[in-house]
């Protein structure tokens, strides 16, 4: 659920405080990134 009024109006990416916002994954519309290792196949 998006609680931030800026995220509701324009989205987290367009917010002026996006880079410093500690709650964009909680209050905003950003999805939490999963810590999966990248598939790095070396030939």
Image (cartoon, rainbow, N blue to C red):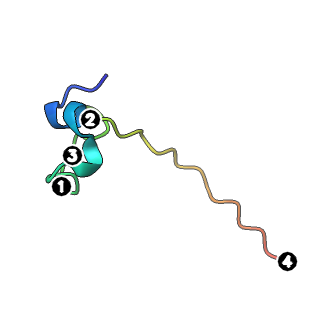
Q: Residue placed at 52% from the left, 49% from the top?
A: 35
Give the mark nearest the N terminus, 3 or 2: 3
Left or right: residue 32 compared with residue 36: left
Distance of mark 3 from mark 4, alpha carbons? 40 Å
Q: Given contact means CB atoms under 8 Å apart, are the residues at marks 2 and 1 in contact?
A: no
In the picture, which quadrant includes the N terminus? top left
Q: Residue placed at 18% from the left, 31% from the top?
A: 4
Front label number (3 vs 2): 2
Front label number (2 vs 1): 2
In the picture, the disc for residue 43 is 4
Give the mark nearest the N terminus, 3 or 4: 3
Q: Residue placed at 26% from the left, 44% from the top?
A: 12
Query: Which element type, helix, strand or loop, lies under badge 4?
Result: loop
In the picture, the disc for residue 28 is 2
Q: Residue furthest top?
A: 1
Q: Quadrant of residue 9?
A: top left
Query: Which element type, helix, strand or loop, lies under badge 3?
Result: loop
Left or right: residue 29 compared with residue 3: right
Query: Which element type, helix, strand or loop, lies under badge 1?
Result: loop
| Image position, residue 11 (x, y; %) | 27, 40
User: Mark 3 — residue?
Assistant: 22
Q: Given contact means CB atoms under 8 Å apart, are the residues at marks 1 and 3 in contact?
A: yes
Distance of mark 3 from mark 2, alpha carbons? 10 Å
User: Mark 1 — residue?
Assistant: 20
Q: 2 above or below 28?
A: above
Q: Quadrant of residue 7?
A: top left
Q: Residue furthest front?
A: 10
Give the mark nearest the N terminus, 4 or 1: 1
């Amino acid at each position: 659920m998006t609680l931030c009024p800026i995220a509701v109006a324009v989205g987290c990416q367009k917010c002026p405080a996006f880079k410093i916002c500690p709650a964009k994954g909680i209050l905003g519309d950003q999805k939490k990134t999963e810590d999966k290792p990248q598939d790095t196949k070396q030939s």
